[in-house]
Image: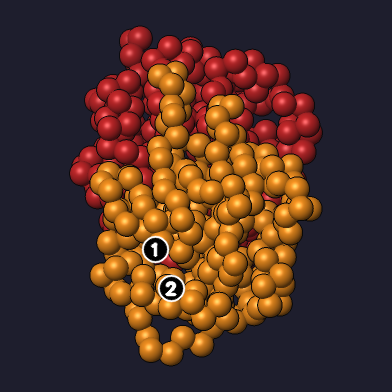
Amino acid sequence: MIKNVGIIDYGCGNIHSLKCALEKIGCKVTFINHNKEDVKVDALFLPGVGAFDIAMKKIKSKNLDVLVQSESKKGKLIFGICLGMQLLVSEGVENSIQSGLNLINGDTYRLKFKNNEKNINIGWKNTEFIEENFLKEFNDEKFYYVHSYAVKTKDENIHSYSKFNNQKFISSITKNNIVGFQFHPEKSGELGLNLIEFVLKAHS
Amino acid sequence: MRIIPKIDIKNDYVVKSINLEGVRKVGNPNDLAQKYYHDGADEIIFMDVVASLYGRNNIFDLIKKFSKDIFIPITVGGGIRTLQDIETALYSGADKVSINSAGLKNENFLKEASKEFGSSTIVSSIEVKKIENQWYCYYEFGRENSQIKLLDWISKINQIGCAEVLLTSIDKEGTRNGFDLELIEKIHQNNFNIPIIYSGGCGNIDDIINIKKYILEGDGISLSSILHYNLENLKNIKKCL
């Protein structure tokens, strides 16, 4: 299993609770908040809450986009969570159009909300992993979501789907050494920890 | 429906009040938090009930301990007054912070907090009391009437962009004789797009079943007495819903 992991810290989100989750499964965690020449971790976690454009600007201002892209080229595991997953695609549309890390071809859109619905998908939702997927043992389990935007990408990049008020959306994506989860595995109980462990084992 | 145990803390003890008055010790925060986590809580809220009165934030040391073993969303509230407080809470392992007094005194604080940390990090806590057919928002643990009307304040919160509202009925809080149905109906009629966590009054499973029709996808309920006093088991509650 990959044990030496970094968390991209661009000043957004619950990075300490992610650190606790990773330590619980036996990882050694380093926060990475600037683009150092030599990154000695075997996987990079990209967390995130908030808006796509603000997050991306913060990442770019610290040159962390270049770091994630170059580590990805080296074949290191890139693990996006929530907004961090959305940042992996080519373009975001939250507040303003903003280019993403462009590691996976795709873009984002705002979920459709009717007048009498809540304008955020929050809570534990069933997650449907597609067959022949390496995460299929997590099929139909519940994970914790909190988001208003979702990603669009090609079928071949899709790990799983979930639903908000019967509206189906893509809830995890993958391409080679890159994975992204719209839900928060670090906040989804023991099951979420198992999923992180599973991915770290599969990519080692 | 999200089921969210709320643990009120005073000087390292779990306490429980009635109508936000006369807190009584009911247990150890770590024991209860662990129990609720393992019994299937969807999230947990920790509230330092005297912090906003006395300007203390000692709850963060407790959160640091909890967050090493509890892997569901943790909301921390009570006495959050500055962006630095929020950063300290997140640094201690919280995922969200709940803000009441400081937001009522200065709504710009909520705006700045949502912008800086992401709106899904900010929970607006609202404590209301009914006076002559009108609900008013209180602060400083139910002691001060802000004179701000509830429906106006929720509309404002919606615009500001907090992710959710924790709505406590002071009239029902700690009484265990059912949620504030009148209040919940009123909120329901107004079709707010912001998720609401209803708090105050739950004493048994029927109380939850009674309000089920008003709970939309994304909404939740917060439970204290019913769990702290072992009136009902969380696993059982989840099974029945």
Q: Position of residue B216 (x, y in %)?
A: 54, 23
In screen coordinates, is A124 left or right of A8?
right
* Residue B34 visible in the snapshot: no
Residue at the spot of label 2: A68
Image label count: 2
- The chain that appears orange in the image is A
Quickly name the residue at label 1. A101
Identify the chain of the residue marked 2, using the numbered disc in the image. A
- Residue A8 visible at all: yes
Instruction: Give amino acid for label 2.
Output: Val
- The residue depicted at 74 percent of the width and 31 percent of the height is B237
Nearest the viewer among A159 and A116 is: A159
Mark 1 is on which residue type?
Leu
Q: Secondary structure at mark 1?
A: loop
Q: Residue B60, percent across and down?
A: 47, 62
User: Mark 2 and mark 1 in contact (Cβ < 8 Å)?
Assistant: yes
Instruction: Name the residue rendered at 54%, 49% in the picture.
Output: A154
Which numbered disc covers residue B24? Answer: none
- Colour of chain B in the image: red
Q: Is residue B224 above or below residue A81?
A: above
